[in-house]
Image: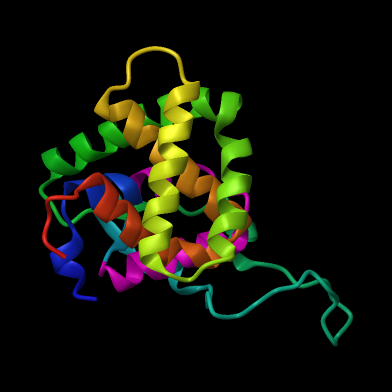
């Protein structure tokens, strides 16, 4: 995948949305970092760039069991919480555009939080089951569209573009919390769904 072809506004908002919402699943964090790396995004804080702080090899799995030396395995990030600056995706746009992307993502997160409390988690479980039963991205696109349409029927009020994006992003995030390896495929499906006129 040529990352530079895929980094349009929707892609940046989607990745910022995922980056700014808390991950409950460490495997999803790893998948998100790998996707950001593959898309040639790094993390930054006030202009300082970090590549996963250089301390954590995301390919190393930790199952929470005792190590052979008898110590409980630890994640270096846990020790660095509060020491390292807060980290955000370094967006490949000028600072004003990056701030606008973060503001749009923050508004989508606010909308998504309200929707998550109502219906998204239930819909995500059903969608995750369906996605796990097929590997066709075309089928994934159809399943995602159907799920978002069903959610829109359950949400009272105006169905603005922001509400549709917030629902879609929330649904994808919730599915990936259950099954992190689906992130990369769902990223591509979301880009097709939200930006259907864009050439692939």
Residue at 29% across, 28% down? 162
**Relative to residue 60, is residue 1 drawn left or right?**
left
For this rendering, which residue is in front, 123 or 18? 123
- Which quadrant: the C terminus? bottom left
Q: Quadrant of the N terminus?
A: bottom left
Q: Main secondary structure of the magenta part?
A: helix
Let me know if residue 46 appears in the view.
no
Q: Residue at x 82, y 81 (%)?
A: 67
Res 79 → quadrant: bottom right
Is 171 included in the stretch rendered in magenta? no
Residue 72 position, x and y percent, is 82, 71
Up/down of 56 relative to 144, above or below: below
Residue found at the very far bottom of the displayed protein: 68
Residue 36 placement: quadrant: bottom left
Q: Position of residue 143 (x, y in %)?
A: 45, 51
Q: Over which residues does the magenta segment extend?
A: 16-40
For this orientation, the residue located farthest to the top is 157
Nearest the eye: 100 or 56: 100
Residue 160 picture location, percent across and down: 27, 23
| Coloration mode | rainbow
Number of on-image labels: 0
């Amino acid at each position: 995948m040529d990352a530079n072809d895929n980094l349009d506004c929707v892609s940046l908002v989607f990745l910022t949305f995922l980056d700014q919402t808390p991950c409950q699943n460490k495997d999803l964090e790893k998948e998100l970092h790998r996707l950001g790396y593959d898309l040639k995004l790094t993390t930054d804080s006030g202009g300082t760039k970090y590549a996963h702080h250089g301390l954590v090899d995301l390919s190393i799995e930790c199952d929470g069991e005792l190590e052979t030396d008898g110590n409980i395995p630890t994640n270096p990030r846990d020790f660095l919480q509060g020491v390292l600056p807060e980290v955000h995706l370094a967006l490949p746009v000028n600072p004003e555009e990056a701030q606008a992307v973060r503001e749009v993502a923050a508004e989508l997160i606010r909308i998504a939080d309200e929707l998550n409390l109502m219906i998204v988690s239930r819909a995500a479980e059903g969608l995750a089951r369906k996605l796990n039963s097929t590997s066709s991205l075309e089928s994934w696109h159809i399943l995602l569209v159907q799920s978002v349409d069903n959610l829109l029927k359950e949400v009272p009020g105006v169905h603005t573009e922001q509400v549709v994006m917030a629902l879609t992003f929330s649904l994808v995030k919730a599915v990936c919390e259950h099954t992190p390896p689906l992130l990369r495929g769902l990223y591509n499906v979301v880009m097709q769904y939200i930006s259907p006129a864009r050439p692939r």
